[in-house]
Amino acid sequence: MFNEFKEKQTQDPFALQNKKLLRIDMRYGEVWARTGSMVAYQGDVRFVNKGSGGIGKMLKAAATGEGVKMMQCSGSGELFVADEASEIQIMYLENDALSVNGANVLAFSNSIQWDIHRIQARGATMTGGLYNVSLRGTGYVAVTTKGDPIALDVASSPTFADAQAVVLWTSGVSMDIRVDTGGLGSMIRGGTGELLQMAFGGQGYVLVQPSESVPQGGHQSGGQTPGGMLGQFMQ
């Protein structure tokens, strides 16, 4: 057992120990990680809980009712992070940007700038506002997914996804909110009722996980606002 599961040796700053465990080499500098995501470390690693990430982000979190709690990690050695055994996907941004569901943010390089941003979409006004986490710059980003995701090229065909299943999309992708009126009738009849869909266009990719995070019973909870659907993420 100890040979099968022993630590993998790599020179990469961010590397998968396995599909559900991220290894971060702290020799490359400070990183940000989801608060509470540390499962182990070796060496001298220190943690500072930044909450919603500074005064500006805290004010946005208070105003929007959303937030993503992060901790700043520094020192030397190896840091291992995970989030409830979810699968982990690693990306390297090179002067690029992502719009990410905050519930899926796991860790990113200190060189990546992040903020809470309101999604600009024509149909978003009817939801009371949708908010995501903006990650921008050059460095590593690790996100979690429930199961193996699919990356859809939005330029190849009109692309639609359930708001609960969308993990992130790349820069160059536009998003609008589509209301499925047939879904309302479906809900009244006791069906699943996919009321709100996200419609994507432009150039780039949208990452979708095989899970809608829908409460047991097969429908959205009645007390939850659509603005919180994208964003159960930021609690």
Image: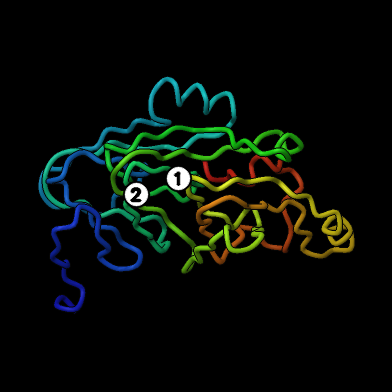
Q: Quadrant of the N terminus?
A: bottom left
Q: x, y (%) of residue 58?
A: 46, 25
The three-letter code of the residue at mark 1 reads: Leu
What x and y, as percent, mark residue 63? 58, 24
Q: Is residue 184 above or below residue 87?
A: above
Left or right, 170 with respect to 2, comes to right
- For this view, does 187 lie left or right of residue 109? right
Is any atom of residue 235 visible in this view? Answer: no
Q: Which residue is nearer to you in this view: 112 or 201?
A: 201
Horizontally, residue 42 falls left or right of residue 235, namely left
* Residue located at (59% from left, 37% from top): 119
* Other residues around mark 2 within 10 Å, as few (<14) / some (14–19) / many (≥20): many
Cβ–Cβ below 8 Å for labels 2 and 1?
yes
Report the residue at 76% width, 47% height from top.
222
Secondary structure at badge 2 equals: strand
Picture coordinates of residue 61, whole percent (x, y): 52, 28
Position of residue 118 measured from the top left corner of the image (x, y, whole percent): 58, 33
Answer above or below: position of 179 versus 63: below
Does residue 190 appear in this view? yes
What's the mark number on residue 141? 2
Instruction: Residue 217: give its label.
Output: none
Residue on which disc 1 sits: 98
How packed is label 1: few (under 14 Cα within 10 Å), some, or many (20 or more)? many
Dot 2 or dot 1: first in sequence order is: 1
Q: Residue at x 58, y 45 (%)?
A: 232
